[in-house]
Amino acid sequence: MTACGAPVASRAGAPANGTQRAVVYAGPGRAAVGDAPMPSLQTRAAPGVLPRRCDHGVIVRTLATCVCGSDQHTLHGPGAAEGMVLGHELTGVVVETGRDVERVKAGDVVSVPFNVACGRCPNCRAGRTGHCLTTNPARPGATYGMGEGFGGWAGLQAEYALVPYADFNLYVFADPDQARERLLDVALIGDILPTGYHAARSAGVGPGSTVYIAGAGPVGLASAVACRMLGAAAVIVGDFNRERLEHVRSLGFAAADLGGGDLAGTVAETAGVPYVDAGIDCVGVSDAAVAGAGADGATPRAAALNDVIGVVRHGGAISVPGVYPAGAPGARPPLGVWLGGIWSKAITVSTGATPARRYQDELATAVLLGGVAIADAVRATAVPLERGAEAYELSGAGASRKFVLTP
């Protein structure tokens, strides 16, 4: 029974001691695998978690949970609390439902979007779930596993997880067996594929578009796949990492080796002119910049974004899924963004957290019925949850992989 007396499904196989295995923050720059509290529909205060009663929530048993570049920012940022559960991408099975849940039921295989959204506020009703007005007491917008500054919701890199406002937040797979068979693909519709798709759409990518994408990591590759889905004629992906660039070429995209220093030449060779219609910055700034300072004490720079500005045509558009630090009011770091280039070229810029739930229905269909092999594109690699710390180390070192943790 829940605290409110509603019948629930039992948590088969759940530990009897009230703890579970999870990837947790273990100090600046470090992730570790350890014990964490089992989730509950009535949460208690814990590292990075605020107490709440969630009769509108469910408990989900994890099938797959991913390591994201944003998790690396959390490791290096100022808002993490030692011992808090990390992660914000989850596919799993519902094992317990709250009193107020009507649509979702025990046994459903579901995808959890990384935004924590109420579904009721003006922003949620307008589809801007990345900036929900009620799920974070600190500011608009909440995300799992990033500490109290992002709403104080426990992370998802664990055996079990709490998902609030389940009827609104959860995407339920119509065919659970099909979802399990394509687990590495569907694991990516909670964050990375919606992020790439939102970035491409926000930059106005459509049939015949030419696009430059800064960064050949998982988000950059997902953006490239999304551009192809939307009909782009030419997609160029830039990076310094030779292994990543070879993979870009193997997928049929053009690769710009930024170590060579001739981005405009690569763009001209591919597109026929030294500019593109749309640009996507999938890099943002370094982990050190997110922490508040450059590693060498210098002012952090928006180098990737400035490259994008430089090759986008006059009247073109840019989207920025890469993370930039907000900074404290009155102490915002000067990131060196080429605002004059944006202004003089009349470039439209869109930024901010992706409203992942908005796109999950169509992207799940594209993956399961349309054959979009996003897992192959980003080199999704299954790793046991107990090796989560190793996955963080490899990801932070620039491995050309998207690590998917499986309990």
Image (cartoon, rainbow, N blue to C red):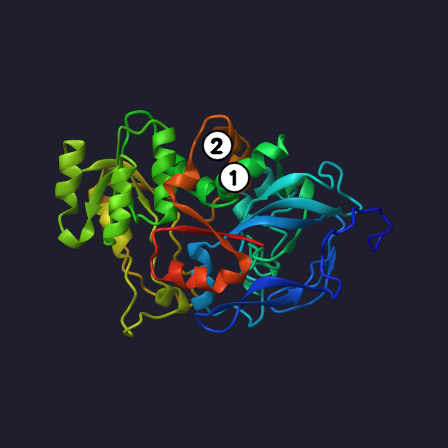
Residue 271 rendering spot, x and y as whole percentages: 18, 33
The amino acid type of the residue labelled 1 equals: Val
Q: Count the marks: how many?
A: 2
The amino acid type of the residue labelled 2 equals: Val
Question: Residue drawn at (62%, 62%), measured in percent from left and top?
Answer: 21
Residue 360 rendering spot, x and y as whole percentages: 53, 36
> Is residue 75 found left or right of 93 in the rendered image?
left
- Secondary structure state at the residue bearing disc 2: helix
In the image, which disc is placed on residue 216?
none
> Is residue 36 found left or right of 298 in the rendered image?
right
Q: Would you say residue 338 is visible in this rendering?
A: no
Decide: few, some or many residues near mark 2? Use Cα within 10 Å; few <14, some 14-19, many ≥20.
many
Q: Are marks 2 and 1 in contact (CB under 8 Å)?
A: yes
The residue lying toward the viewer, choosing from 105 and 386, is 386
Residue 285 rendering spot, x and y as whole percentages: 34, 59
In the image, which disc is placed on residue 367?
2
To which quarter of the image does residue 222 belong? top left
Decide: few, some or many residues near mark 1? Use Cα within 10 Å; few <14, some 14-19, many ≥20.
many
- Secondary structure state at the residue bearing disc 1: helix
Q: CA distance from mark 2 to mark 1?
A: 7 Å
Q: List the residue tagged with mark 1.
A: 186
> Is residue 184 found left or right of 293 in the rendered image?
right
> Is residue 397 found left or right of 15 in the rendered image?
left
The residue lying toward the viewer, choosing from 21 and 307, is 21
Measured along the vertical axis of the image, is residue 69 above or below residue 92?
below
Measured along the vertical axis of the image, is residue 58 above or below residue 153?
above
For the C terminus, give its image quadrant: bottom right
Q: Earlier in the sequence, mark 2 or mark 1?
A: 1
Question: Residue drawn at (42%, 38%), measured in percent from left and top?
Answer: 374
Question: Residue drawn at (66%, 50%), measured in percent from left and top?
Answer: 61
Residue 193 rendering spot, x and y as whole percentages: 45, 40
